[in-house]
Amino acid sequence: MSNDARPPVIIVGAGPVGLVAASLLVEEGVPVTLVETCSELPHDLRASTFHPPTLDMLERFGVVQSMIDQGLICPTWQFRDRNEGVVATFELSRLLPDTRHPYRLQCEQWRLGELLHARLQKEPLATIRFGAKAVAARQSAAGVEIDVATADGKQETLKGAFLVGADGIGSIVRQAVGAAFDGITIPELFLTLSTTFDFREAMPDLANICYLSDPKEWYVLIRTKRVWRALFPVDAALEDKDVTSPERGERLLQGAWRRSVPYEVTHRTAYRVHERVASTYVKGRILIAGDAAHVNNPLGGMGLNGGIHDAFNLAEKLTAVIRGAPLETLERYSRQRRQVALDVVQQTTLRNRAILNTREPEARKAYYDDLRRIADDPEKHRAYVMRTSMIQSLRDVEAVA
Ligand SMILES: Cc1cc2nc3c(=O)[nH]c(=O)nc-3n(C[C@H](O)[C@H](O)[C@H](O)COP(=O)(O)OP(=O)(O)OC[C@H]3O[C@@H](n4cnc5c(N)ncnc54)[C@H](O)[C@@H]3O)c2cc1C
């Protein structure tokens, strides 16, 4: 608990983005109050991919080795045709020497949350309030205020110098910024099934991360340390209980690979997917980051990573402003990170979806030919993995004024 007399930066949301932002700010000597609706850190199964530059960035917190110990290093990833097999395999060793982590790490996002939370608990500059839901936010020239509803039914007002909304897709802070959240909702639901079956028994040349294209039913296979996660598109008109029914799961997995015994499924979750970017990430003393600012489909693992990259950019500029830089410095954060969300994350994830689900044979062939050309040419291969691992976007934003 902070005894600091200075007004803190209030952060709403103890997801990965809020926890990274809080960790960075206290490291710079800035007092932080973090409020989170849930009574403890959320443990639901969501993203599990950490890209190379994100691991490079997280190294300063001393958490990466523990994530590696709990996770699975994936040096390659792959596009396959569901019937014909491998289309192209991409090697992250091509990123050397531009990263200290030339691989994707598969590690459930809540594990990062646990590690950062444990660090923050020891930080005198950090106050963490669980069971505290932000219900309204406002600002004046001098500071910010949020109204918080607590688990015991009370309401109180917290005052701070700045407010960071890392409160996910339904962000209340985004409303206070007055940002539009335009974009599209993907027509299908995404169903993720975790299974103990080792898909390499079925496909020995399978990479740990694989996108399987098919005009009728594409899917994705991602290996974690303990299970394989299979992601399938499902009709959004179905009722929730039908989407996640054991029968549907078994049918989809048997369709992916026919087995004489049923699949053991340890976890299933379905969610609606959007492609949306807030019209601005900043208004005066209020900022938004992560899913509060942008959401996209998970094909490429860019949402969580992009959110963490937001937190680093935001914390650097906010620290500068607290130390005397003009308030407008924060607007560059918005310009830089919006550009990444629109031009890189959205473009890449939508293209990945198109490669997976395009029905016209000519268009599919064109996508496959393009992927093979990239994989076979050393320069193109390196440029492609620089972009898809998000190193390139971190460099390109430096040119944004
Ligand atoms: C079901 C599901 C599955 C997903 N699967 C994948 C995947 O397979 N691959 C992938 O790349 N991405 C996936 N994602 C997306 C990924 O999890 C997000 O990009 C990532 O969690 C963003 O982190 P964040 O910190 O911005 O937001 P979040 O992780 O959403 O955290 C926001 C936090 O704010 C809290 N909060 C919200 N409102 C308030 C309030 N008013 N007051 C206080 N606290 C509040 C919430 O309780 C939450 O803890 C998935 C998302 C969901 C919902």
Image: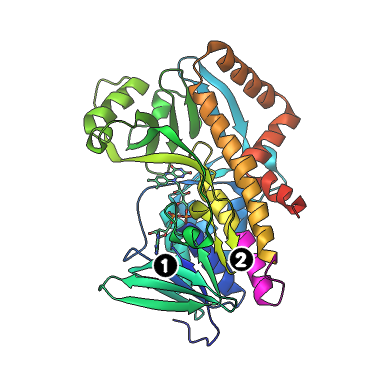
Disc 2 marks a residue whose amino acid type is Ala
CB within 8 Å, label 2 to label 1: no
Disc 1 marks a residue whose amino acid type is Ala
Nearest to the observer: residue 81 or residue 335: 335
Give coordinates of residue 252: x percent, y percent: 32, 25
| Figure check: 35 above or below 251 | below
Nearest to the observer: residue 72 or residue 31: 31
Image quarter in which the N terminus is found: bottom left
Give coordinates of residue 271: x percent, y percent: 36, 41
Query: What range is drawn magenta here?
Result: 312-328
Residue lying at 26% horizontally and 38% vertically, measured from the top left = 240
| Figure check: 56 above or below 275 | below
Q: Is residue 280 magenta?
A: no
SS state under label 1: strand
| Figure check: 345 above or below 55 | above
Q: Is residue 344 left or right of residue 167?
A: right
Give coordinates of residue 7: x percent, y percent: 53, 81
Residue lying at 37% horizontally and 62% vertically, measured from the top left = 41
Residue at mark 2 to residue at mark 1: CA–CA distance = 23 Å
Residue 113, visible in the rendered structure: yes
Residue lying at 56% horizontally and 17% vertically, measured from the top left = 364
Earlier-in-chain disc, 2 versus 1: 1
Q: Is residue 313 magenta?
A: yes
Q: Is residue 337 left or right of residue 356?
A: right
Nearest to the observer: residue 94 or residue 217: 217
Q: Main secondary structure of the magenta part?
A: helix
Mark seen at residue 315:
2
Q: Is mark 1 within 8 Å of ligand 1?
A: no
Residue 59, visible in the rendered structure: no
| Figure check: 9 above or below 237 | below
Q: Which residue is mark 1?
A: 136
